[in-house]
Image: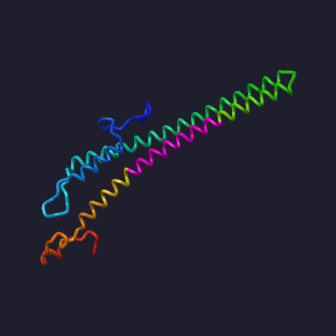
């Protein structure tokens, strides 16, 4: 869900961040295996395009969250201004009236009710904005965790020793092979 007036990332269709992450995961999972290896062949252009789309999407998500926070702050400021204006109006009216006790009590009560309503509305909107932002961040975190799990799984597959594949290590090559883990 995007707010009107917010710049949107140039991503094809109405795909979201989670869809892009799933597409990247699918690209890695469905990649063709290299013969006699645990490695896979991934189309570099497709992977880079998906990563660029993901990177382009993130600022949009952050702008949207900032927009919601700004909108909430503007609402709170407007509610405070309205409450202050209503209190001032009630104060001026109460001063003009001769029967100050009953009228001033009513004005104060009305102003207090208005302030209480404005504060309740601002709390509600703040909680809604925080819940929305938390939900978006949780979805993003979940997508990143799935992507991280896929990456770890791929790295684990890349670390299969030659003996597990039924191959004998070549003495000449075995000592010259680069061990990425340093062991």
Tell me which corner region of the image, top left, top right, bottom left or bottom right, holds residue 49: top left
Q: Residue at x 87, y 21 (%)?
A: 98
* Depicted 51 relative to depicted 84: above or below: below
* Depicted 175 relative to depicted 31: above or below: below
User: Residue 139 lies in magenta, yes or no?
Assistant: yes
Q: Residue at x 33, y 43 (%)?
A: 19
In the rendering, at what x and y percent does residue 80 appear? 65, 34
Residue pushed farthest top? 97
Closer-to-camera residue (37/45): 37
Question: Which secondary structure type mostly characterizes the magenta part of the structure?
Answer: helix
* Depicted 133 relative to depicted 34: above or below: above
Q: Is residue 158 left or right of residue 85?
A: left
User: Residue 140 lies in magenta, yes or no?
Assistant: yes
Q: Is residue 131 left or right of residue 181?
A: right
Q: Residue at x 42, y 36 (%)?
A: 1
In the rendering, at what x and y percent does residue 3 appear? 44, 33
In the rendering, at what x and y percent does residue 160 appear? 23, 68
Closer-to-camera residue (122/84): 122
- The count of marks equals 0
Q: Quadrant of the C terminus?
A: bottom left
Tell me which corner region of the image, top left, top right, bottom left or bottom right, holds residue 90: top right
* Depicted 95 relative to depicted 26: above or below: above
Q: Residue at x 35, y 45 (%)?
A: 18
In the rendering, at what x and y percent does residue 83 appear? 68, 31
Closer-to-camera residue (159/173): 159
Q: Which residues make up the magenta segment?
A: 119-142
């Amino acid at each position: 869900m995007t707010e009107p007036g917010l710049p949107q990332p140039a991503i094809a269709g109405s795909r979201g961040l989670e869809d892009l992450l799933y597409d990247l995961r699918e690209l890695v999972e469905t990649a063709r295996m290299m013969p006699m290896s645990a490695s896979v062949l991934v189309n570099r252009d497709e992977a880079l395009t998906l990563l660029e789309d993901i990177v382009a999407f993130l600022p949009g998500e952050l702008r949207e969250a900032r927009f919601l926070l700004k909108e909430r702050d503007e609402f709170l400021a407007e509610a405070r201004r309205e409450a202050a204006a209503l209190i001032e109006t009630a104060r001026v009216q109460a001063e003009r009236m001769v029967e100050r006790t009953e009228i001033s009590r009513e004005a104060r009560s009305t102003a207090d009710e208005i302030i209480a309503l404005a504060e309740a509305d601002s709390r509600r909107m703040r909680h809604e904005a925080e819940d929305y932002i938390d939900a978006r961040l949780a979805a993003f975190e979940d997508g990143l965790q799935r992507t991280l799990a896929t990456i770890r799984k791929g790295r684990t597959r890349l670390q299969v020793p030659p003996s597990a594949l039924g191959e004998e290590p070549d003495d000449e090559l075995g000592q010259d092979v680069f061990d990425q883990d340093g062991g």
